[in-house]
Image (tube, rainbow, N blue to C red):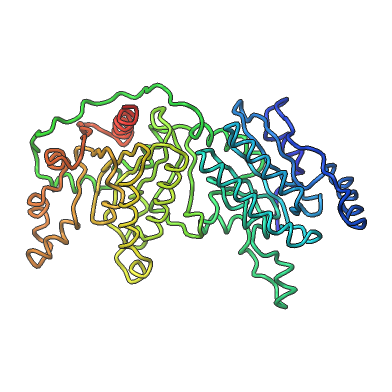
């Protein structure tokens, strides 16, 4: 297995923290009550590792932003967690909570310390309790998994991050492959517990070398911690309610379906900063038809979740996994006390036996239910296509916006035509009858603002206009 450089705990701290900002929170470990043989192991481990335990904790700054840290030292008994190490971790997390600091954890461990048995094993519960108190306080928890991270460490504080990344080539898994082989008489399949595979499956957010951790922490905390900036993008005068449509709404439908139409990626490219993409549900599912990001839209920090029309095709429709990713974004926004921005742009949710068995209807319902009960500010944008339950799942924000060519319908107009007329040839007529266009939605009070599209608009100019309106609504 090819891995990146094996960093010691002190090397990683020196790499990530700003020079001169390191402050240790660790107190000396008393080993006098341990068995004599185990005391010898602990002394030998300390001499080999250059640390008094398998974790170091403290505080420092990353590009000027204060953070608390918990870093494993693998050279100390394979980074295993005994009672003293667990007590140190929980104390550091609780101190970070009391001081209002984000926590950055970097793991490298074989798991629970076997020399201390069950008493060490149950300490993972106390670490988890401290971390959930930290999260309940609305404070960020960032996790960096190093090679190797297995067992109880991965199954507790290694898997509770708001954002979780792993170093390239890292072995990350619940069961150590050597233990599996010894118990089962056959090797564990190659590649399953590899960081890259876990990222592809939606278990972790990304594979990130240690050298890039300062930039990642900077981007994340730039959204999660820094106050809002002043707005710089020019806001267009919103459409006045009651403004009549001066062309057939079918023209809008065709334009929003065309290649080159503005998409969620354009909003981030031309109106976002400090953007950090998150991938997957963090529960082993990933669907790229939905995009999740921490970002600042025209200076306003938020969690953004958007339907990415460029990734939705007949072969890759938006399935239930995409909506579970969307609910992850909603939960992150609520817990981190950040505004949520949702972007509606979809030809519709997946219609298939697999989607039915994956609870597509239930996921639509749960997205709607989550959105209408959120306590943080929420803004949704009908950017283009808004078809069916897949669109409705991400619509009901406190403030609903649309572009002037955006539209919303219970089915694609062709489908509505089949139901009413028996064939799809009356699609344009059905779209007009159903009042699917943004101006009708505004007149009926189903959207709260419409961003005008103008002649000569490009994805960049329209994206900037949409972001300016979203930021203005968040600011107010």
Instruction: Please name the residue shown 54% across and 56% down the image.
Output: 203
Q: Quadrant of the N terminus?
A: bottom right
Q: Is residue 135 above or below residue 237?
A: below
Task: List x then y, in percent, for residue 352.
Answer: 31, 68
Q: Is residue 255 left or right of residue 162?
A: left
Q: Is residue 367 left or right of residue 294?
A: left
Task: List x then y, in percent, for residue 170.
Answer: 67, 54
Q: Quadrant of the C terminus?
A: top left
Farthest residue in the bottom direction? 185
Question: Number of callouts in the render?
Answer: 0
Instruction: Please name the residue shown 64% across and 62% down the image.
Output: 174
Q: Is residue 425 above or below residue 23?
A: below
Q: Nearer the viewer, residue 326 or 190?
A: 326
Instruction: Please name the residue shown 71% across and 57% down the image.
Output: 111
Q: Nearer the viewer, residue 241 or 268?
A: 241
Task: List x then y, in percent, for residue 389.
Answer: 26, 56
Task: List x then y, in percent, for residue 218.
Answer: 56, 33
Q: Nearer the viewer, residue 273 or 162?
A: 162
Farthest residue in the front direction? 33
Determine which quarter of the picture holds residue 118: bottom right
Determine which quarter of the picture holds residue 80: bottom right
Q: Nearer the viewer, residue 269 or 65?
A: 65
């Amino acid at each position: 297995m090819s891995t990146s450089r094996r960093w010691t705990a002190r090397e990683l701290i020196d790499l990530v923290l700003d020079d001169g900002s390191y402050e240790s929170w660790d107190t000396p470990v008393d080993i006098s009550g341990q068995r004599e043989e185990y005391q010898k192991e602990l002394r030998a481990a300390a001499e080999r590792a250059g640390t008094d335990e398998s974790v170091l904790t403290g505080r420092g700054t990353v590009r000027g932003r204060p953070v608390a840290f918990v870093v494993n030292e693998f050279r100390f008994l394979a980074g295993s967690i005994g009672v003293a190490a667990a007590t140190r971790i929980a104390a550091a997390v609780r101190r970070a909570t009391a001081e209002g600091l984000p926590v950055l954890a970097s793991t490298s461990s074989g798991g629970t310390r076997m020399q201390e048995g069950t008493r060490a094993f149950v300490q993972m519960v106390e670490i988890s309790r401290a971390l959930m108190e930290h999260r309940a306080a609305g404070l960020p928890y960032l996790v960096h998994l190093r090679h190797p991270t297995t067992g109880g460490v991965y199954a507790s504080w290694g898997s509770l991050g708001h954002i979780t990344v792993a170093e390239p080539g890292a072995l990350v898994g619940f069961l150590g492959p050597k233990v599996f082989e010894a118990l089962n008489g056959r090797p564990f399949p190659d590649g399953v517990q590899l960081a890259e595979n876990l990222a592809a499956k939606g278990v972790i957010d990304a594979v990130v070398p240690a050298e890039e951790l300062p930039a990642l922490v900077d981007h994340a905390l730039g959204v999660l911690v820094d106050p809002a900036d002043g707005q710089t993008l020019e806001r267009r005068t919103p459409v006045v309610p009651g403004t009549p449509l001066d062309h057939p709404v079918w023209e809008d439908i065709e334009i929003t379906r065309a290649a080159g139409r503005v998409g969620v990626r354009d909003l981030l490219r031309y109106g976002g900063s400090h953007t950090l993409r998150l991938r997957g549900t963090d529960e082993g599912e990933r669907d790229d038809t939905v995009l999740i990001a921490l970002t600042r839209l025209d200076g306003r920090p938020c969690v953004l979740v958007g339907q990415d029309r460029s990734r939705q095709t007949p072969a890759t429709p938006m399935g239930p996994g995409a909506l579970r990713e969307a609910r992850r974004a909603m939960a992150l926004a609520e817990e981190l006390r950040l505004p949520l921005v949702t972007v509606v742009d979809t030809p519709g949710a997946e219609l298939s036996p697999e989607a039915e068995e994956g609870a597509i209807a239930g996921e639509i319902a749960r997205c709607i239910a989550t959105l209408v009960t959120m306590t943080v500010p929420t803004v949704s944008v009908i950017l283009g296509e808004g078809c069916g339950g897949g669109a409705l799942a991400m619509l009901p924000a406190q403030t609903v916006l649309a572009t002037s060519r955006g539209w919303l319908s219970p089915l694609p107009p062709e489908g509505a035509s089949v139901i009413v007329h028996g064939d799809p040839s009356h699609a344009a007529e059905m779209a007009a009858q159903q009042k699917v266009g943004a101006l009708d939605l505004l007149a009926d009070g189903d959207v709260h603002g419409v961003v005008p599209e103008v002649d000569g608009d490009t994805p960049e100019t329209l994206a900037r206009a949409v972001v300016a309106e979203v930021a203005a609504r968040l600011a107010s």
